[in-house]
Each structure stands twice: as structure tokens, then as C-alpha cells.
Image (cartoon, grey):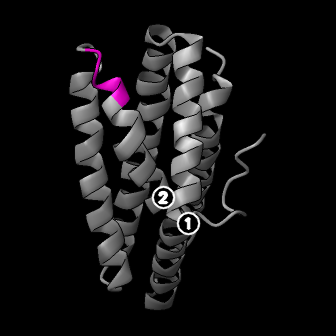
Amino acid sequence: MLRDPSLAPLSRQHQHALALCVRIDRAPRSTVQENAAWQKEIVRLYEQEIRFHFDAEERVLFPAAARFTELCPLVDVLRGEHVGLRAEVAAAAEGNMTGPELQDFAAHLSAHVRREERELFEGMQKLFSAEELARLGAAVDADFAASGLPSDSCDLNR
């Protein structure tokens, strides 16, 4: 299904996260220096974009989706994944991740993004009216603006 324009800013951010996952999967992670560089990259993307993305989802998107009983279990899963991903980012910030743990992080983040795109966004597009999706998109944009999301992280007006 084609992505509704109201959800497009979140989908663009998902593309940034998936690109990081692909780069981690393809890159060498055999030395302490290589692992340290990837951990810094994870923390950088988290601080510049992912934390704002998670917060907007938790404040705006998830409560709206949870109004529909068929999406409630999925919202619970996604909230739990946010907790786990934040813990992995915290480990990266401490410099404690090994090569296999970096690969696990990339797999977890990738699976999370794909679940949101394929299950949450698709479900919302089926259950929400066009007007509801437009209001939701505006609320996400307002949340980003109020939160201090760096303007170069995501073009909200595409």
C-alpha cells in the first residue's frame, strides 16, 4: 500500500535507520576501533533523530493507534521494542557493545522499523479516515517542532 503523506516523515526517518542497519551489517566489526566507531554512529543517529522519532510515536502515534483494539497488541510490542532499543543505545553510549552485539542491534532496529511500516502504518491507513490521518500527521509534525528535532534530520514538508 502506498504510504499516506501524513506518515511520510516517519517513513523517511525509518529509511535513515534502515540505512544505518545495512551499513553495520556490511561493515567490518572485528577491532575495538571499528566497534567504537559504530557505537558512536548509533549514538549520533539516536541523538539527532531516533529519540525524537520514538518520543513522537509514543506521545502521538501509539495512543491514536491504541484506540483500535486490533492494533493494541502491536502497540504494546512496539513500545517494548523501544525500551529494548534504548537499552542497546545506552550500551553503545557506554562503549560496551561487541561486534555480535552491534549486529544484533542492527537486526533489532531493522525488524522494529519493518514491523512499524508493514503492520502499524498499514493498519492505521486501513482504519483511520483521511482526515484522521491528516490530523495525526499534523500532530506528529507539531511534536517534532516542539521537541527540538534538528531541522536537517527530516524534511517535514515533503
The picture places residue 134, in percent across and down from the top left corner, at 60, 24
Q: Nearer the viewer, residue 87 or 128?
A: 128
Instruction: Give the residues drawn in magenta, as a range.
Output: 64-68
Q: Nearer the viewer, residue 139 or 11?
A: 139
In the image, residue 75 lies at what x, y percent?
Answer: 28, 32
What residue did someone put label 1 on?
A: 148
Q: Is residue 143 above or below residue 123?
A: below
Q: For residue 95, say whether it is visible.
A: yes
Location of residue 152 (image quadrant) = bottom right
Instruction: Identify the residue shown where x is 31% and y is 74%.
Output: 90
Element assignment for label 2: helix
Q: At x 41% / y 52%, what residue is drawn?
A: 54
Q: What residue is shown at x 64% (from left), y 22% (from top)? A: 4
Mark 1 surroundings: few (<14), some (14-19) or many (≥20) residues within 10 A: few
Farthest residue toward the right? 158
**Observer-nearest residue: 84 or 54?**
54
Q: Amino acid at mark 1?
A: Gly
Percent of width and height locating residue 44: 54, 75
The majority secondary structure of the magenta stretch comes to loop
Rendered position, 2 above or below 142 = above
Which residue lies under the disc numbered 2?
Answer: 52
Which residue is at the front of the view, 133 or 36? 133
Lower sequence index among marks 1 and 2: 2
